[in-house]
Image (cartoon, rainbow, N blue to C red):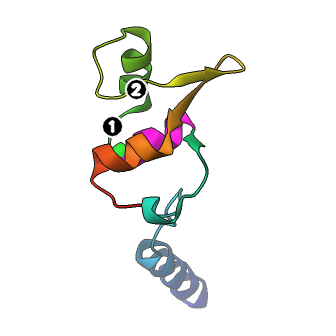
Amino acid sequence: MVQWRLKANMAHEIQSAQPAAPFPPLEQVTKPNLKTSEAAFYLDRATQTLNIWACRSGTGPIKPKRIGGRLAWSTAEVKALAGVQS
């Protein structure tokens, strides 16, 4: 009986726990560039969508920079596209 109550309490705690946001609010971001996963999160798009924007130039609303072979998305452009004031 006690074991069942513990399991029930644990299940309730797991269900009621709010998942933490993976990234801080866009208004608080001060770094000049974002990773693809961050930009995708803020724009509510899949990371693959942003990769397509990067590969097919002219298909997306913003273009990334390449820094060290990786994509870097301008924070200012992401904020403007998301409608967030900096």
Q: Quadrant of the N terminus?
A: bottom right
How crowded pointer 1 is (Cα within 10 Å; few <14, some 14-19, many 20+) is rated as: few
The quadrant holding residue 40 is top left
Residue 16 image offset from top left, x and y in percent: 42, 78
Q: Residue at x 32, y 47 (%)?
A: 80
As displayed, is residue 76 above or below residue 57? below
Q: Main secondary structure of the magenta part?
A: helix
State the extent of the magenta-drawn residues as a range.
35-42
Q: Residue furthest right?
A: 68
The quadrant holding residue 39 is top left
How crowded pointer 2 is (Cα within 10 Å; few <14, some 14-19, many 20+) is rated as: many
Q: Which residue is mark 2?
A: 50
Residue 66 image offset from top left, x and y in percent: 60, 20
Can residue 28 be found in the magenta stretch?
Answer: no
Identified by mark 1, the residue type is Arg
**Mark 1 and mark 2 residues within 8 Å of each other at the beta carbon:** yes
As displayed, is residue 14 above or below residue 65? below
